[in-house]
Image: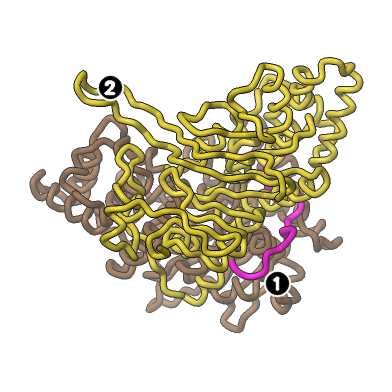
Amino acid sequence: MKSIETNHQDAGVKETPADTPILQVKGLTVRFYTRRGIIQALRGISFEMKKEQVLGIVGESGSGKSVLALSILNLIEKPGEVLSGQIFFKGLDLLKLDKKETNKIRGSRISMIFSDPMSAFDPTLTVGSQIIETIQRHHKGIGRKDATKMAVELFRKVRIPSPRRRLEEYPAMFSGGMIQRAMIADALSSNPELIVADNPTQALDVTIQQQILELLAELKRRQGTTLILITNSLPILARYADEIMVLYAGVIVEHGERQEVFSKPSHPYTRGLIDSTPKIKGQRLKRLKTIEGFTPSRVETDLQNPKCVFLDRCGLAMEICRKSMPEPVFLRDTGLHYSKCFLASELNQKPL
Amino acid sequence: MEQALIEAKEIHKDYPLKKKSLFKKPEVIKAVRGVSFSLLKDESFGYVGESGCGKSTLSRLLIMLEKPTSGEVLYQRKNMHKTTKGEMKQLREKVQLVLQDPYLSLPAWMKVGDIISDPLNIHRKKMTAKEKRGKVISVMAEVGLEAHAYDRYPLSFSAGQRQMINIARAIILDPEIVILDEAVSALDVSVQAHILNLFSSLKAKRGLSYLLIAHDIGVVRHMCDRVAVMYLGRIVERGSNEDIFENPLHPYTQALSAAVPSIESGLQQEEVKVLSGEVPSPINIPTGCSFRSRCPEAMPICERKNPQLIRTSETHEVECHLFD
């Protein structure tokens, strides 16, 4: 019985010893079991990242992007389950580690920044005490005085003014932008090699968002961190990501270098997302070009039905789209840019 | 001169905080500090600004949920806050509101049809049940909801569909003005586009006027004929869509536009001018120009004197010492 997740092939995964990617995700499939049915959160996700790269992942509600972030940090718990797949971090399969080993890596070599800073901080403790605790956890034997010094330095790095005073305040006393910076400071405290930022600027004002994104970019440059930037806003990735990955209903529908994906989007969903975003420069349209329908309810009634995930909303759907999920179509000689659509090559040549 | 549907004249809204000591004056949040504007018939007027700018307070004042501390809000020349009960009831039919949250705004225990017909129960008591149902179904079709949704509960609908229910409820009394307070902010981009197109169709079909309040500049640019930029309770710049987006004058307007990520500028790696600092607290508003603490063009006069509103063209006004 072929189900949708086994139809996928790994895309562009190279395995040369001298060039080992820092992160390799292979065939990751995650399900959630709920009262209303089974949700296929991720279906056979495969990709890899090189050191110091920024991977931008874009998707709307139900795309699976947050589940992907949690999977990398091995935080999927009941009613969720990693059905299959591997996540190699520098050759180590994160999904096969025991609790002790996971705790060694999580929060130290791999850190996460959440979209809701309040979920990262305990409201009943001062921000300083929490950051100091993180520092002490990852720097064995460091005394409180030195840890405090480090915390002050981190706050300075993320441009929180009056750092000493701020460390003694509670999360509720921080503005949205400030608490986000504090979370970045916390995530940086262990000098991680990989940071997963899940919608780090979601609830922030646009001028503050700009500050935070510029800060992340600068810190990444200075510390040589590899960064996964997850967002529901495609334009952010135009500036900050090296590669773009478009997620829809748990499937990667398009993946490629930034310039290519934006100038030659080759999947109807990617094109739809670009068209749906109101622009502040250029021609002011009377109506926005839209994608039909709504983001899908994630309860699968027919797990074995091998149709294209985007079928119900695709304006270009053909008969073949009802019968199988398209294989990746590679659009460049290097094999980096691909799109899972039977019309990928045509769309690639067609300007928006 | 076109008659204004709504006219706001120097409205202020203060929220006094609890007294901290017997001897000190209580601190006051100055949410709106002297805002004046007019909404004309058939126009879309947009308010854009970030946290603390006062736009949400403004929408509450315009929908008569709260009274201004001083100043007047006039609807067809009559003071909205000094009306009789009967006049107020009529007013509420004419001015409706769609809010941001598609989840909290719909009672989970009521069927969709009952939610949408609720305003009819208050304002159209003379309608029969059959007539009400007919009107609800008709309005549902207008917003794109299928008739069978009538007997279902909000829980089974997506965020976008829930907003459609909210919109249906807002238009069923055939209002003249709809205030859209962050009405698409909680929606996915693809759904947002649908809803924005729906707003455009409804406006054209029904001759509606919109007051759109949003932090998303792209949405304001797409929808609005005239735009006001707010900062810390004041309008710092106001003009036509072209004025604000093609010729922004106030440093804050420029910073706001520059901060919006765009695919073109991102791909070209255009240099980013980051606006530093945070919005000051509305309890402690800086003297002189409230933007001076973050303004890249701040001059000594900005600390001493409040800038006055200066008209730079027939449609364009700005409050900034750079244009004195």
Residue A323 versus residue A95: which sits nearer the camera?
A: A323
The quadrant where residue A329 appears: bottom right
In the picture, the disc for residue B19 is: 2
Residue A25 versus residue B23: which sits nearer the camera?
A: B23
- Does residue A306 appear in this view? yes
Disc 1 target residue: A352
Which chain does the residue under circle 2 lie in?
Answer: B
Q: Position of residue A303 (x, y in %)?
A: 71, 45
The letter of the brown chain is A
Which chain does the residue under circle 1 lie in?
Answer: A
The letter of the yellow chain is B
Residue type of the residue flagged with mark 1: Leu
Q: Which residues are magenta?
A: A281-297
Vertically, is A260 above or below B46? below
The quadrant where residue B323 appears: bottom left
Q: Residue at x 89, y 16 (%)?
A: B128
For the residues marked 1 and 2, what is the alpha-carbon distance in whole angstroms?
Answer: 59 Å
